[in-house]
Image (cartoon, rainbow, N blue to C red):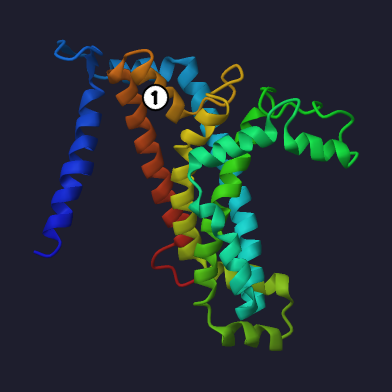
Amino acid sequence: MLLAPAALFLAAFVLWPLVRFVYDSFFEISPFAGAPRTFVGFANYATAFASEAFQSASVRTVVYTVIVVTAEFVLGLAVALLFTALGRRSTFFRTMFMYPLMIAPVVAGLLWRFLLIDNFGIVNQLLFEAGILSSPDQIQWLSDPDIALFSVAIPDIWLTTSFITLVLFAGLQNIPGDVIEAARIDGARYPRILFSIIIPLLRPVIAVALIVRGIDAARAFDIILIQTDGGPQGSTTTLSLLIYRTMTRFGDPGLASAMGTVYLIVMLAVAISAILLIWRPGSAR
């Protein structure tokens, strides 16, 4: 009975919209209110899979997610281990390191847009003054299609590495110190301890962190929209942006729902795979 209000809330604002979203993917829907709906079966899905824009956006979404999650995990684990080694002396640094979490993604996107903008961006100017670049406009961070996807990933990495650090740091506090001490007495070096003891014991925490951040990174929208709006030449158009444009600009809710449903199924499959491969519930190792 105590769970009933929360269950009703989730059913009304999460489950029902999700069911309706999947249901709409089987119809050709006019963008005008009150217009007739035509049942087309899996035609929207066939159109989505045959669309070059959908295929390209899917690949870019995977690449973007891999870049963001990999960088955040490596940096987050390194910082979490550093904070653990410092103990209570890391309190001040932990507080400062968490500040990016308080910044809205839109604000972060605007901030990094001005930092990376061509010709007079602060990043290029600093690299030029350091002698790394020959001119302040040598690197076109947001205008070069070859590096634009990496450039829009930088704000996301800067913004949410703190989250990975916080989760991993909390997990490190639950690792028994006597296990690590026993390994040191047996002569194990730190790399061996890290890969044979610390990381295996962190599997459930790592699985949660990667799943949450992976899904969040795959649906990146506002940071990319603010910086490049999917450009240049569509090089930063991810699935979220493509679905949004299909719904609003191209006026095809049915096709947008089909694309979103495919994305939903893939994310669910990835989450289940991460749980089985990383967390390994019931595994003795």
Q: Which residue is drawn at 40% across and 37% down?
A: 266
Q: Nearer the viewer, residue 116 or 153?
A: 116
* Crowd rating for badge 1 (residues with CA inside 10 Å; few <14, some 14–19, many 20+): some
Figure quadrant of residue 90: bottom right
Q: Residue at x 71, y 70 (%)?
A: 191
Figure quadrant of residue 140: top right
Q: Residue at x 66, y 27 (%)?
A: 142
For the question of whether residue 95 can be seen, the reply is yes
Q: Which of 114 and 148 is in front in this view?
A: 114
Q: Which of 197 and 23 is in front in this view?
A: 23
**Position of residue 246 measured from the top left corner of the image (x, y, whole percent):** 38, 18
**Position of residue 132 measured from the top left corner of the image (x, y, whole percent):** 88, 38
Residue 166 placement, left or right of 250: right
Quadrant the N terminus occupies: bottom left
**Position of residue 113 measured from the top left corner of the image (x, y, whole percent):** 62, 33
**Position of residue 261 measured from the top left corner of the image (x, y, whole percent):** 32, 31
Figure quadrant of residue 155: top right
Q: Considering the numbered disc 1 on the image, is that residue within a helix, a strand or a loop? A: helix
* Disc 1: which residue: 244
Residue 246 placement, left or right of 43: right
The tally of labels here is 1
Q: Residue at x 49, y 53 (%)?
A: 102
